Amino acid sequence: MNKERSFPEGFLWGGALAANQCEGAYNIDGKGLSVADVLPNGITGKIMSSDEGHYPFHDAIDFYHRYKDDIALFAEMGFKCLRLSIAWTRIYPNGDDTQANEIGLKHYEDVFNELLKHNIQPMVTICHYDMPLALVKKYGGWRDRKLIDLYVRYSKTLFERYKDQVKLWLTFNEINIISHFPFTGGGLLLDESDENREQIIYQSAHHQFVASALAVGECHKIIPDAKIGCMLAFIPFYPYSCDPDDVLAAYEQQQEQLLFSDIQALGEYSNFAQSYFAKKGINIEFSAGDDAALKDNKVDFVSFSYYMSCAYSANPEGKETTDGNILGGVKNPYLETSDFGWQLDPKGLRYTLNMLYDRYKKPLFIVENGLGAIDTLNENHQIHDDYRISYLKDHLIESKKAIDDGVELLGYTSWGPIDIVSSSTGQLKKRYGFIYVDINDERVGTLNRYKKKSFYWYKELISTNGLSLYK
Ligand code: BG6
């Protein structure tokens, strides 16, 4: 085998899922309602508290009941790792219940055993967009410090129960989501015009940083051979032009994202964060012990999602714009866009890996990357998703170049290895998977699973440890 071109030995190939987007079974076996359960049109849509209408996250693709068959398909592709999240509301239905729900705990124990049976290492996100709705109603979400204790208790319950099964953990999915979608990220019900909006968001984020740090400490104590990381939604922001105003505007936008991982990886608020807060009149209230908690409990590795890049201009008026994952921006004339308007930029991934590694000097993990596209199932139940193969191939070739640049990359879990519900829009027609799920937005379909062309492509890629990228 040509060692120079294959990925490092032990590279963790796999896929990534989130409980709310795949499990369904939203109200059984003692599960409480989560913030995802009141978002019929995904996180960019309206919050609805009634039972009217259709809630795609309620049923999703029924991974809750079908996980054994789905995991067998992941194993057939040769997965070494599956990133998945635990629904907080299956363990503590209201978040502050006195006792954990044994049915929920047992469910995940069975899921992890199934993975381990197939030699697939679980990587668990403790909270992925689905905090208990009851905590929103009772405490106003993460604005209340009480959430720190509740989250840490929940995390400890997981570490203690799964210490022999799970050695890879992530504290919060895309911790920076809170500044763009405060309800999903922090259970915050805020008015766009609320004057205190940023104050509340960043104070709540501070509570999450402390909670995350304390969970890191508990994880290290309870499972000394585990690794626990942070997870950032990362979009590289390019200056729209070499006009210094564009360069500075893009830089500032980038710093706003990195402020989150800086705290988790470096253990303190950056200079940028402090001056940003001062300029905006944001005053973060620290309690005794917060500083030490952040400093003493840095993450072991930095993980992130990467789908696209954005161009950023100091004067965006009159310029064409594009949609994006969490954030859009000005259209970059050098890039193509996906079916959903996201700008495709494989080289941006190499740039990102180098930039994050230079900054943190910690191992990195790409825990989300993939192409959301509209697939067509033909009469023979085949899906010729060459566009997906080409997206993934280009991104992986750039990842390998970053490894050759000297970046320590632990693994790659592509987003939604089986079709799941889109988090931004709640759609099922936006598909990322190697496995097609026969269900549409009207919930018509058998839920049968079919292997796409990309299934066989990914399988070969894993079996050659990346070498087949170059054939
Ligand atoms: C990430 C989220 O931001 O993007 C996932 O962590 C999400 O939950 C993914 O599914 C892709 O976004 P979407 O909206 O296409 O599902």
Image (cartoon, grey):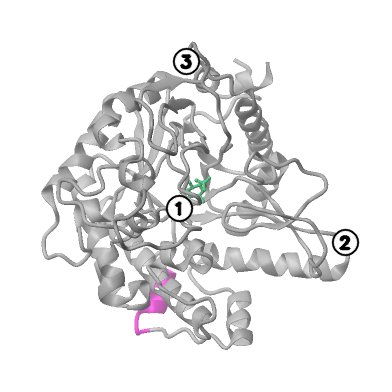
Residue range of the region highlighted in magenta in the rendering: 287-295
- State the SS at label 3: loop
Camera-side mark, 2 or 1: 1
CA gap, disc 2 and disc 1 = 38 Å
Residue type at mark 3 is: His
Q: Nearer the viewer, residue 468 or 52?
A: 52
Q: Which residue is mark 1?
A: 41
Residue 69: percent from left, percent from top? 30, 24
* Labelled disc at residue 242: 2
Identity of the residue drawn at 15% across and 46% down: 29
Residue 291 part of the magenta segment: yes
Q: Around disc 1, counting alpha carbons within 10 Å, would you say few (fewer than 14), some (14 to 19), or many (20 or more)? A: many
On-image quarter of the N terminus = top right
Q: Which residue is mark 3?
A: 381
Residue type at mark 2 is: Cys
- Contact between marks 2 and 1 (CB within 8 A): the answer is no
Q: Is residue 265 visible?
A: no
Residue 278: percent from left, percent from top? 60, 86
Q: Is residue 250 left or right of residue 279?
A: right
Residue 387 part of the magenta segment: no
Q: Nearer the viewer, residue 37 or 12?
A: 37
Q: Nearer the viewer, residue 111 or 296?
A: 111
- Residue 396 vertical position relative to residue 243 in the rendered view, above or below: above
